Amino acid sequence: MAAVTETIVFRWQFCGGVDEDSAQEVRAWVGAHGDICLAVAVRTATGGWLLDCGDLWSPETADMDMLFNSARSAIEHLARLHGAALVEAVCRCGTDADCD
Ligand SMILES: [Zn+2]
């Protein structure tokens, strides 16, 4: 397991739902408004989660068949393999401060 060498701020996207419980696919995007997709997790017919290919990270063959009990744990597994810690981005739109 790689040591954590970087922190990446990201935001969730819940495709086909409003949260992880209702989504069919969950994507992690860089920053509060960035257009780079870090990683993708897809719900299986049995309710588990599999990793799919993002712009930045894609699962190795061995990780493609790994079944996770949440999209979050799937994507965090991939982040750890890349030595990254994920921190949820903060959107500050509507304020004087910049978004993450
Ligand atoms: Zn914003």
Image: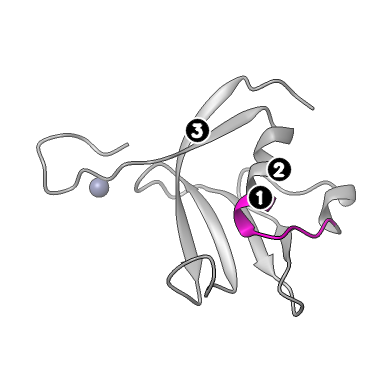
The magenta stretch spans which residues?
Answer: 66-74
Residue matched to label 1 = 73
| The label number, if any, that marks residue 26 in the structure image | none
As helix, strand or loop, the secondary structure at mark 2 comes to: helix
- Classify mark 3 as within 8 Å of ligand 1 or not, answering yes or no: no
Q: Residue 52 placed where, x, y %?
A: 71, 59
In the image, which is nearer the foreground, mark 2 or mark 3?
A: 2
Query: How many numbered marks are there?
Result: 3
Q: Are marks 1 and 2 in contact (CB under 8 Å)?
A: yes
As rendered, which of 88 and 64 lies closer to the eye? 88
Task: Say which quarter of the image contains residue 27.
Answer: bottom right
Q: Are marks 3 and 1 in contact (CB under 8 Å)?
A: no
**Mark 2 crowdedness (10 Å alpha carbons): few <14, some 14-19, many ≥20:** some
Q: Amino acid at mark 3?
A: Ile
**Mark 3 crowdedness (10 Å alpha carbons): few <14, some 14-19, many ≥20:** some
As helix, strand or loop, the secondary structure at mark 3 comes to: strand
**Mark 1 crowdedness (10 Å alpha carbons): few <14, some 14-19, many ≥20:** some
How are the colours assigned in the image? one colour
Quadrant position of the C terminus in the picture:
top left
| The label number, if any, that marks residue 8 in the structure image | 3
Q: Amino acid at mark 1?
A: Ser
